[in-house]
Structure formats: structure tokens, C-alpha cells
Image (cartoon, rainbow, N blue to C red):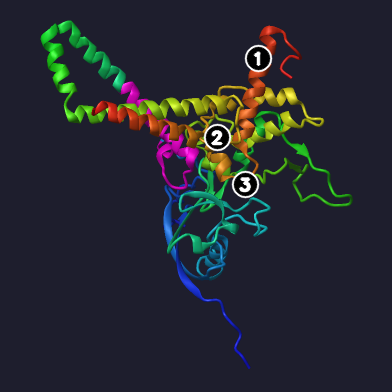
Amino acid sequence: MAEPQTTPTRPVRFRVHRRKAGDSGGRYDSFEVQLDEQRTVLDGLVAIRKEQDPSLTFRHSCFHASCGTCGMRVNGADVLACVTKVADLGPTVTVEPLANIPLVSDLVVDMGAFYGPFSRAGRPLLRESELVPGSQRAEGIDVLTRYEDCIECGICVSACPLTGSDPRYAGPAALCAAGRVIEEPRDADRLAALRFADGSHGVWRCHVAYECTGACPSNADPGAHIMRLRRAATAGRFRRWFGVGRAAR
Amino acid sequence: MSGQRPAAPVATAGPVERRRGWTGWFDPRGRRLGGWAFALNRLTGLGLVAYLYLHLGVLFLLSQGPDGWDAFVDVALSPPILVMDVVLIFGMLLHGLNGIRVGLVGYGMVATRQGALFVGLMIIGAIVLLAATLRVFA
């Protein structure tokens, strides 16, 4: 009887950012994991937590680039760990938390801060999802929200050079959501979304690096949304100045 | 208990700010075409500002009479300075042509084709730079 075929594995060295609440600074811990060429960075982190260090913290859920929870920096690039194969990364894989979002622990960032710009705008940018009839919400969740394409992973915010140097910048994710409202308002307040975006720390802070669009794992294209918002804001100003058409709409 | 040690200070448990800062503008890891354009635009912008002050300093030599100016012209025609002229033209072309990209894309035109626009403008810039270099060293 033929023996079952096994996929060859190789040792992969992980350098993982560590920082627990109360630590004065971060550090990097090294782990070696045997992985085959189909395994991802997230598979490696799961193996580390299971077999070597149960105190390692990171977020994940779906394992197939749908939920957006495992966004992190891998060898300096902002990616979803669940679809980033270790075979493409070389012998050492350096894993860090997303940048420009406050750090909670190890690889976990404060997604509440990520959603801050939406809250400051009075949440005009997110529309309620239709609940499946009969479904129940998790405890503490009052409303479910989502905007098209964006999986709310925070990768664009981490990749954006301007968000890294201007804490007041609304950031590509919130502006992308505002762009969707302008393009397809349904029942949302289009003017409120435009007012939120049209400011020195809104669309005009962007310096057209397009790192957000390049890093986005779901093709939401925040950069193009920001530029279309600029055009809408500029057109609104011209209409107000010259009294042409509808004011700012 | 009398020998009990005082409690350790309570650790701060809240999230800590972790921004890349302006040095992140020049971090090459994971950078794409638009990111390079962004970083190079800042570097060339700083270079052009420095050149502006250098230019004003050179113009000041005119007030020193013909001797001072002629001495400067001799230096300006030396090969190291001519190489710096080419570097200056490179910076002007990159900054100016990328500025056209930023201007067009920044007002919603070709918002989804900014990468191709950058490549096209840089090809034009390379041709002009080559012609200018030949002219400088002619």
C-alpha cells in the first residue's frame, strides 16, 4: 500500500512585534515554524500561538480575505495575513501591527480609533445593513453597518504616508466611505458627507501617493474616491460662487 | 503584614499611539509607484528650494563687479558643476511633471489611471533630460 504523500515543509523564521499593555516599548520575538509552501502568515501565527507562545495576540476570523480583521504589516508591506503566503516572503518574516492606528497589544490595534473619523462626522457615511430576518445581534452591538467593497481592515490607513504624519487627517477609509455616499446617496445625507470630506484635514490633505489604493485588498480604491470628492467639492464651490445649478449638490 | 512590599505602579493599559511620522514618507518597504512619486516630490522640492537660495547668492555676485562674476562663470563651467546642473534639471523635471500628475489627478481627472500618467510623464522627462544633458556637455 502506497504511503500517503506529505507536502514538504521548510523552517520559516518569524520576527513578531510584541508589546503588552504597560510595556514601556515594543520588542521583536523570534519563532521558527515548519510550514509548507501553501501556508500563509496567519497560519504561521496560529501555529506559534498554539505550539510556542499562547500569549501572542492578533486578530483574525475568516481566513479568506473577507472579514478584514487580520490586517498587519508583513516585511513592511500592509497586507491581510490570511492571504499572504510565506513562500513569497523569504526566510525571515517580520510581522508588525498596522501603523497609524493605536496599538492595543502585540499585533492588535484599536479599531475604535480607526472608526473615529466616522463618529466625528456623526456617522453620516455608513449605511445600515439589512438584517437577515430573525437573526440576532451580538451582545453590545446595536446596529450593523457596512459600505460597499471596503472590508474595513485599516490597511489603507496604515499605508497612507499622510495619515502617519497628520493625526487630524480623516484618512482614506472614511473618505472612501464619504465618496460612496456622494456617488450613491440612497437615503444618506450627501451634503453632510461632502462637508465632512471638504476640509484641510479631509480630501485636501491627501498628497496623491495612492498607497491606499495600492494596498487595498478589496479594490475599494480610496484614492480615486478622494479625488472624485475633490472634484465634487470644487464644483460645489464654483456653483456657489457663480450661482450656477444646485448649491453644493 | 508589616513586611509587605508596596504595590507596583499600575501599568497604563490603554492603546498607545504608533504613527510612522514623516520619516515614514521615505520608508522604501512595500512602497508603490505613487508612493515613490510622493517621496521624490518632497526630496526634489527641498532641493529646488535650496537651489533658489543658492541662485540668489550667485546673483548677488553681480553686485561685486565684473571680476567676481567672471570668476564665478569659470567655476560654473567646470565638470562637477555641470553634473550638478544635470541633477538640477532632473529635479525640476521630476517635480514639475509629477506636479502635472498631482494637479490632474487631484481634481478628479484620470483618478484611476494615475500610475500610467506618472509613467508617461516620466518617459517624457527622461527624453528631455537626455537632450538637456547632451546640451549641457556640448
Question: Could you tell me residue A194's position as x and y percent?
Answer: 68, 24
**Residue tagged 3:** A153
- Neighbor class of circle 1 (other Cα within 10 Å; few <14, some 14-19, many 20+) is some
- The span shown in magenta is B23-50
Circle 1 or circle 2, nearest the eye: 2
**Residue tagged 1:** A237
| Residue A205 in sight | yes
* Prevailing secondary structure of the magenta residues: helix
Residue at 15% in and 22% down: B75
- Neighbor class of circle 3 (other Cα within 10 Å; few <14, some 14-19, many 20+) is many
Question: Could you tell me residue B46's position as x and y percent?
Answer: 35, 26
Relative side of B16 to B112, left or right: left
| Residue A202 in sight | no
In the picture, the disc for residue B33 is none
Q: Which of A24 and A184 is in front in this view?
A: A184
Question: Could you tell me residue A93's position as x and y percent?
Answer: 46, 59
Q: Nearer the viewer, residue B10 or A26?
A: A26
Q: Which residue lies furthest to the right in this view?
A: A133
Q: Mark 3 lies on which chain?
A: A
Question: Could you tell me residue B29's position as x and y percent?
Answer: 43, 47
Residue at 57% in and 56% down: A81
SS for callout 1: helix
**Residue tagged 2:** B114
Residue at 74% in and 46% down: A140
Which amino acid type is shown beneath numbered disc 2? Gln
Which amino acid type is shown beneath numbered disc 3? Cys
Q: How far apart are marks 2 and 3 (CA)?
A: 24 Å
Relative side of B45 to B30, left or right: left
